[in-house]
Amino acid sequence: MKPHQSHDPFDPDFDAEDDFTSVEDAWREPPPAAAAADPFAPEALEEVEPEAFPDPFADLGGARAADRPDPIVIEPAGGHDEDPFGLDGAVSPPPLVHPVHDMIAGAEAAFGESSLPRITIHIFCVNAATAEMAGQAAADRRMERATVVTRMGGLAAAVETYRNEATPSLVMVESADPGPQLLALLDKLAEVCDPGTKVVVVGQANDIALYRELMRRGVSEYIVPPLNPLLLVRTAASLYADPSAPFVGRQVAFCGAKGGAGASTIAHNIAYSITERLLTGAVLVDLDLPFGTAGLDFNQDPIQGVIDALSQPDRLDTVLMDRMMVRCTDRLSLFAAPATLDADYDISTEAFEEVTQKIRSAAPFVVLDLPHAWTPWKRKILLSSDDLVIVATPDLASLRNAKNMIDLVRRARPNDAPPRLVLNQVGVPGRPEIPVKDFGEALGLTPALCLPFDPKLFGQAANNGQMIAEVGPKSRSAEGLDHLAQQIARREPPQVQKTSLLSSLFKKK
């Protein structure tokens, strides 16, 4: 047997059996010379010519998932040392630790929120912890159409299983074996795999050489610890992403913990801030069909609106959608509610789901203003939205209702960040209130924004058909709304280049 150092494992004439019969694991224990080299140097990443013999996984395809971004830390509005709204106790307390939020906040920021098609996924695990993560991934909202079966035994069990049954669309196999045994078992799996099956390997060695060898053999993806449920979901979804599919914007749902909490006002102002402060496109959809106020708040009275789309969801396309929407600004479009009581609005959950999904192709952000009434379609939209904002006032009824909604969302969306909480109308004179800190601790999360009670500012904006940023651009409420918009959009406002007075005088001359 020839020594490992004398061979290039990616040479077309390289024989894997000759080199991997050594007891020493070549993947985990590289020779000193190789260990000192940079595995990500350009020379180590040169393209390798395909082998002359057929690839046993040639029909399986492959796609490498993007590296997870660093977590994004979302701070509460204002600071902890001073009150930006001029209210004692109205500032959010220090962040309460939420393990799911901390774990996946960064990953979710980059996740395209794509759902898997109706496929069957088999996951073969070695460790009990991986099996538990697989179960959590199977319950994820993005995998609701997929059928997931989890089994123990790892790669070896997968080989034995598929000797007697057909392989599904996607197979995820975990292996703790060293490189030679892993590759040998993969070759056996290739012999029993049906054409078109995609294979994802969950390994232990974070090794670029092993990764490239697996890709050469037709493995679709190779992932290593640390694992989390969302990483499994992202990996599976990336393999079925259709480049020709329509663009899908981020859906943000706003819901009030009780009637009159101000959820519609907050939703409208956030949509405006996303477009006018962050300079990106957005669509505002008013789904409070009998009592919606988006048309009033933007001083619009469109002939058509969201009810026309809900009445004929199968006919809704880009041209028809553009006719039904009204332009509030250059970047903000509005799907207004009819706001009449002439109809009962008996519309199916499927119609709401289809229409909102089609609207997501119209802009990078879709803001949904949901009514307070609890209906099956509202529950469906809440659980399927990318971001959820619950608006509450600091009283007992809002606390109870907000807790019920947050508990529901946490159970149904275990891999998503918790909803954002906005406390509105804080500091009403003479009204007993639950302190902000106690309110957040009871719900297990920190309010993302606390807005002071300011009837003059909000009343003037509502009566004039304007946004808070238009009536009081320098007000603390406008600054807080802009801050929340940045949290939701996960981006900073564009930098404005400042010019000196002297340079402006020269330009005038």
Image (cartoon, helix red, strand yellow):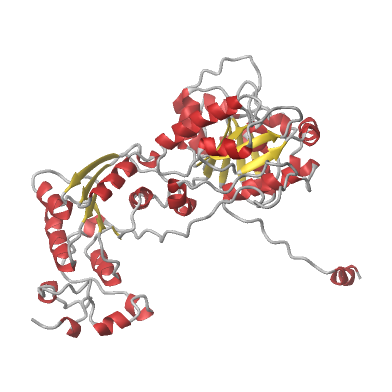
Q: Residue at x 67, y 31 (%)?
A: 294
Q: Residue at x 24, y 61 (%)?
A: 218
Q: Nearer the viewer, residue 62 or 433?
A: 433
Across and down, in percent, residue 56 comes to 17, 60
Across and down, in percent, residue 450 comes to 66, 40
The residue furthest right is: 509
Across and down, in percent, residue 349 comes to 46, 25
Q: Residue at x 9, y 50 (%)?
A: 160
- Tally of numbered discs: 0
Q: Nearer the viewer, residue 126 or 49?
A: 126
Q: Please state if 277 lies on the left or on the right of 212 as rendered.
A: right
Residue 367 visible, this orientation? no
Q: Nearer the viewer, residue 393 or 223?
A: 393
Q: Please state if 166 lies on the left or on the right of 81 as rendered.
A: left
Q: Residue at x 25, y 60 (%)?
A: 203
121, above or below 501, in the image: above
190, above or below 248, in the image: below
Q: Please state if 110 lies on the left or on the right of 5 as rendered.
A: right
The part of the image, by quadrant, that contains residue 467 is top right
Residue 89 visible, this orientation? yes
Quadrant for the N terminus in the image: bottom left
Quadrant for the C terminus in the image: bottom right
Across and down, in percent, residue 273 comes to 68, 46
Q: Nearer the viewer, residue 88 or 194?
A: 88
